[in-house]
């Protein structure tokens, strides 16, 4: 006969096993998968854009967060300077590491807390409350050792998120608190979407426009804030519609663009998307002008004052001649599976 203590342990083991099975139930992949997490492209707001070259595919976030992946090339080589041979070596190393969430091999991310032995796939870690920081050494932490905030539970049940006006989640890891504005609480997913659409040069507190404490605290709490400069071109005919150059696949020296309403045909403009039925949409998380460089010399402080960074080029008027040319990090032959989505 089992004792009460043994029965309790057995019950806990079965519950843990059932939870693990729910996480690991995945549909067999029929398309490309990330070499560093073995999963399909997925949501770019959570995993970054899916980069593909030849037979090698990786999530952008898996690429920059992998614990032992060096960046040995120039930004125009491989994937942001990460060479294909190094990615394959990192995948081979990860194949010996078991994810503490799904219990499967291929976990390329290691918790950076001293003496912690947990490894995890990026998607699995996100499901279990792990956190990754997108500055300095690009550290990742398991749910037990991640940076935390002192969010009072009473406020979460009474307040709503300022950005989406919906009730806050009862799970504290799904909310994030502002260091200013009387410590307003937001949904983490809402702040992340806001960061992707505003980017570094426009990211600030939604309420008080704080550009110092707010961005640095969001970085500490794992919000990805891309560094990109928008280059907007107005319709040369009506001037009331606009598009980003990269969203509409315009050449860097293009000065003329016409919207779908004004353009008599596709040949009359510089715009030639893969799917001509798609309407240009600039709400994507696509970040072609973000230059990644892993800085191993930084400490926990995200870096210099945000007020000291130069402002972006906001707008290119149609037919203008003295505007700034935009540049791209994309190396020749690198394919991105998703640029813009149809509204």
Image (cartoon, rainbow, N blue to C red):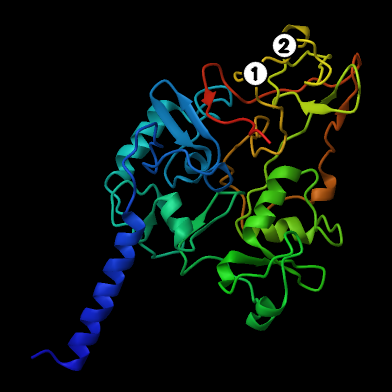
What is the number of the mark on residue 150? Answer: none
Can you say which quadrant of the picture contains the N terminus?
A: bottom left
Percent from the top left, x then y, of residue 53? 46, 23
> Percent x, y for residue 311?
85, 38
133 with respect to 96 (left or right): right
* Cβ–Cβ under 8 Å for marks 2 and 1: yes
Q: Quadrant of residue 58?
A: top left
Residue at image point 24% right, 73% down: 14
Of the residues under marks 2 and 1, which one precedes in the sequence? 2
Which residue was labeled with disc 2?
266
The x and y percentages for residue 281 are 71, 32
Number of numbered callouts drawn: 2
Residue 78 lies, with reference to residue 70, above or below; the image says above
Q: Which residue is painted at 76% across and 44% down in the image? A: 198
Q: Which residue is mark 1?
A: 276
Residue 44's place in the image compared with 188, above or below, is: above
Give the left or right position of residue 308, taking residue 216 as reference: right
**Left or right for 205, reference 78:** right
Determine the residue located farthest toward the left in the rendered image.
Answer: 1
């Amino acid at each position: 006969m089992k004792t009460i203590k043994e029965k309790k342990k057995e019950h806990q083991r079965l519950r843990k096993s059932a939870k693990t099975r729910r996480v690991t139930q995945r549909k067999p992949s029929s398309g490309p998968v990330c070499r560093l997490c073995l999963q399909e492209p997925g949501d770019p707001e959570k995993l970054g854009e899916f980069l593909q070259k030849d037979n090698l595919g990786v999530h952008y976030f898996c690429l920059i967060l992998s614990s032992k992946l060096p960046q040995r090339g120039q930004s125009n080589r491989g994937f942001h300077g990460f060479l294909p041979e190094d990615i394959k070596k990192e995948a081979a190393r990860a194949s010996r590491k078991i994810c503490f969430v799904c219990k499967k091999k291929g976990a390329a991310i290691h918790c950076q807390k001293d003496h912690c032995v947990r490894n995890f796939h990026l998607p699995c870690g996100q499901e279990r409350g792990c956190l990754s920081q997108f500055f300095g050494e690009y550290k990742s932490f398991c749910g037990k050792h991640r940076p935390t905030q002192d969010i009072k539970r009473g406020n979460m049940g009474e307040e709503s998120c300022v950005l989406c006006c919906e009730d806050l989640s009862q799970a504290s890891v799904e909310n994030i608190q502002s260091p200013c504005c009387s410590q307003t609480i937001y949904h983490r997913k809402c702040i992340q979407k806001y960061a992707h659409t505003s980017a570094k040069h426009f990211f600030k507190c939604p309420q008080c426009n704080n550009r110092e404490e707010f961005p640095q605290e969001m970085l500490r709490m794992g919000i990805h804030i891309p560094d990109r400069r928008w280059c907007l071109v107005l319709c040369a005919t009506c001037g009331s519609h606009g598009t980003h150059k990269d969203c509409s696949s315009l050449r860097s020296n293009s000065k003329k663009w016409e919207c779908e309403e004004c353009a008599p045909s596709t040949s009359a403009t510089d715009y030639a998307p893969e799917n001509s039925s798609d309407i240009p949409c600039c709400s994507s998380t696509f970040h072609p002008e973000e230059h990644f460089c892993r800085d191993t010399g930084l400490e926990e402080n995200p870096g210099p004052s945000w007020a000291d960074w130069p402002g972006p080029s906001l707008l290119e008027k149609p037919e203008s001649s003295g505007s700034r040319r935009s540049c791209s990090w994309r190396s020749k032959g690198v394919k991105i599976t998703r640029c813009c989505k149809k509204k």
